[in-house]
Amino acid sequence: MTIEINATNRKTQGTGASRRLRHTGRVPGVVYGLGEVGMIDIDHNELYHKLRSEAFHASVLSLVLEGKKEPVMLRAFEMHPFRQQVMHVDFQRVDLNKKLHIKVPLHFLNSDIAPGVKAGGKISHVLNELEVACLPKDLPTFIEIDLAELTLGHSIHVGDVKLPAGVEVAGHHHVADAVATVQVPRGVVEAVAAEAAAETATPAAKAAAPAAAAKPAAKK
């Protein structure tokens, strides 16, 4: 379902005009791309609550501008330094026939049942979003990463991510880049190292160890 955001054309601009607009509960903004830059304003409460939705940040939206709809994407917004107030918002018009390059959030599943977690490891999310390229109609709201098979000391890489049809990895990502990994606890590392050292010890050293332990201490 397409998310709609209602706007009206803004007749005035400038710092003073924007301040007066905010006092009436409206947020000044712009919409650009595929034509002239449009000066708009939006109801603050409507925009504020929609900004709290993850999908609003990574979806093709429908900007309803005085009854006419056009596809846009959220590109930037400015918050007040210490108030819960949106100060400004930017939207970009979308060409439905051209590929988008956009960052999509990652949702991690089954971390609690991952073998590496059960063995005492801790999952580290190396990436929380992935830049992709796709047509607007194929844009996913999020991408799921299943951690159910992730074992201790291993990672899921960008090349392992299952992307929806029509979506491909873009930007600076490489197939070998880690997305999530199970970090090995320090105690486990030390235990494995000790066990490895014991396994590689020479037969003479192994025989000497019990003998050294049984030898009485020399009298002073």
Image: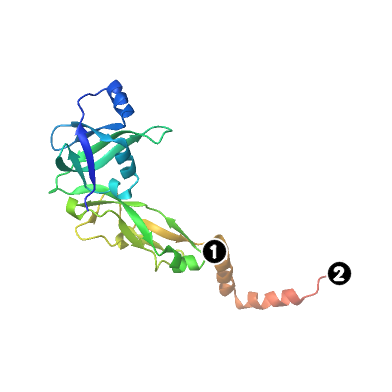
Name the residue: 21% across, 29% down: 10
Residue 148 visible in the current orientation: yes
Left or right for 55, reference 113? left
Q: Is residue 135 visible?
A: no
Secondary element type, mark 2: loop
Q: Residue at x 24, y 24 (%)?
A: 13
- Which percent across, then down, holds residue 206? 64, 76
Question: Left or right: where does residue 25 sit relative to residue 211?
Answer: left
Q: Position of residue 50 (x, y in %)?
A: 31, 44
**Residue 7 x, y percent position in the rendering:** 22, 36
Q: Nearer the viewer, mark 1 or mark 2?
A: 1
Q: Which mark is residue 73?
A: none
Residue behind mark 1: 189
Q: Position of residue 138 (x, y in %)?
A: 19, 55
Q: Quadrant of residue 169?
A: bottom left
Res 81 → quadrant: top left
Identify the residue at image location x=81%, y=71%: 217
Q: Tell me which amino acid carries mark 1.
A: Val
Q: Please, which residue is most extreme toward the top here?
A: 16
Residue position for label 2 = 219
